[in-house]
Image: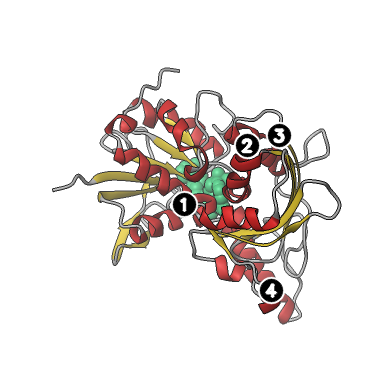
């Protein structure tokens, strides 16, 4: 009989955590136990899972001792506290927060792009930012074929990227507006319903936001390319699920549009939807609930030699978080050496 694994999901009651549970189920991950962990706020509550329910437990230092691996999505401070505890107790952690992404001792992994760095892990593996994941899955085949010197990207990010409370805020504000009531705000600094906010995470000294700088720095780390230039503008839009991105790239060597489209069509994790004459292009409503990265509107950039531009859409909770994490878990269980930890600091 093939082995089954005990899996912890920290942040199970949140937007990403619930999707991790769905992914484990959908992808038929071989688990003997799934332990749903969160704070005392949701301890005792029930979550639908695998045709039944599981009860959320309050996380504590002993939560990981008998687990084979854990997927974290409870925010950076929780990851900072519990990541080393889990890793030291022999439970490798796949972390969705930004806490460890730039730590040089922690691999930052998108399976379609750089799964080889998984072998370097000592107990914590970082999942990149949702916007970075879908951009790099789309660009990887072009990067490999002709090199990419520069990326300019504008994102249109769904409220689920902020978490469960933001999903409720968009729903509440929409209802309030239709009922001619005053709009209440708790999550965003401005109304998000019927609005766009060019502001995701806090602003940094260079005028970019942290979310935008994540796309810059994570791209360099994942491609292992300090010279690649990236400029991002990240925008929150009143969409529930699915991030969209307009991407312009300057390649190192020329590539014809048809060849680029062909490469992306054959690449793992990408679904090319690019038939504008029939009004077919990627859209958030079609990507929601799906694991693929959808690419369309692929065309030559008329403003730049060796330039290409495209429209890339993915479900931020699936490929942008849960699916990517579960795919990493699938790689870990394929090689018993990868389930070992050697966390020392
Ligand atoms: N949403 C996305 O698209 C996305 C994509 C990539 C990465 N991420 C990252 O994933 C993480 C979670 O995001 P989310 O969107 O799922 O947020 P969320 O919906 O707000 O969920 C947060 C989860 O963390 C738990 N939590 C909070 N504080 C805790 C504590 N002190 N101890 C234990 N558990 C605690 C919450 O449990 P309670 O129910 O008990 O409060 C809840 O389960 C964040 O770091 C985020 O940056 C999110």
Q: Which residue is mark 4?
A: 174
* Disc with the residue nearer the chain's start (3 vs 4): 4
* Disc with the residue nearer the chain's start (2 vs 3): 2
Query: In what element is the residue under mark 3?
Result: loop
Q: Are marks 3 and 1 in contact (CB under 8 Å)?
A: no
x, y percent for residue 175: 67, 76
Q: Is residue 334 above or below residue 191?
A: above
* Disc with the residue nearer the chain's start (2 vs 4): 4
Residue 300 image-quadrant placement? bottom right
Q: Is residue 132 above or below residue 343?
A: below
Q: Which residue is mark 2?
A: 218
Going by the image, does 147 lie left or right of 317?
right
x, y percent for residue 33: 25, 49
* Disc with the residue nearer the chain's start (3 vs 1): 3
| Crowd tier of the residue under label 4, counting other residues whose Cα lies within 10 Å: few below 14, some 14–19, many 20 or above | some
Q: Which residue is mark 3?
A: 228
Task: Let me know if residue 64 appears in the view.
Answer: yes
> Residue 311 versus residue 240: which sits nearer the camera?
311
Query: In what element is the residue under mark 1?
Result: helix
User: Residue at 31% of width from left, 28% of height from top?
Assistant: 340
Task: Let me know if residue 234 appears in the view.
Answer: no
Marks 2/3: CA distance?
11 Å
> Residue 74 versus residue 300: which sits nearer the camera?
300
Q: Which residue is mark 1?
A: 322
Protein image colouring: secondary structure
Confirm or reject: label 3 Cβ below 8 Å from ligand 1.
Answer: no
């Amino acid at each position: 009989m093939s082995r089954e694994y005990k899996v912890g999901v920290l942040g199970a009651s949140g937007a990403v955590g619930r999707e991790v549970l769905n992914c484990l189920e959908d992808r038929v991950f071989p688990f003997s136990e799934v332990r749903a962990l969160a704070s005392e706020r949701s301890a005792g509550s029930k979550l639908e899972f695998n045709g039944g329910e599981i009860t959320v437990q309050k996380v504590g230092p002993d939560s990981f001792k008998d687990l084979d691996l854990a997927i974290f999505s409870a925010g950076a401070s929780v990851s900072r506290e519990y990541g080393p505890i889990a890793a030291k107790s022999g439970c490798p952690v796949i972390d969705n927060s930004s806490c460890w992404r730039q730590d040089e001792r922690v691999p930052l992994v998108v399976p379609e792009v750089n799964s080889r760095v998984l072998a370097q892990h000592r107990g914590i593996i970082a999942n990149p930012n949702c916007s970075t994941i879908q951009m790099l899955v789309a660009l990887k085949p072009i990067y490999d074929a002709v090199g990419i010197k520069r990326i300019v990207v504008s994102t249109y990010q769904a409220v689920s990227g902020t978490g469960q409370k933001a999903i409720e805020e968009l729903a509440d504000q929409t209802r309030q507006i239709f009922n001619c009531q005053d709009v209440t705000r708790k999550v965003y600094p401005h109304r998000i319903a019927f609005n766009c906010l060019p502001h995701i995470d806090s602003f940094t000294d260079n005028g970019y936001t942290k979310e935008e700088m994540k796309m810059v720095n994570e791209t360099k780390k994942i491609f292992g390319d300090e010279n690649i230039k990236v400029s991002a503008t990240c925008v929150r839009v009143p969409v529930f699920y699915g991030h969209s991105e307009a991407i312009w790239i300057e390649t190192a060597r020329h590539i014809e549009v048809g060849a680029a489209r062909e490469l992306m069509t054959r690449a793992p994790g990408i679904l090319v939807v690019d038939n504008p004459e029939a009004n077919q292009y990627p859209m958030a409503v079609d990507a929601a609930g799906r694991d693929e990265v959808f690419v369309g509107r692929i065309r030559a950039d008329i403003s730049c030699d060796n330039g290409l531009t495209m429209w890339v859409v993915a479900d931020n909770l699936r490929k942008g978080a849960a699916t990517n994490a579960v795919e990493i878990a699938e790689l870990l269980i394929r090689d018993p050496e990868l389930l070992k930890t050697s966390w020392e600091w």
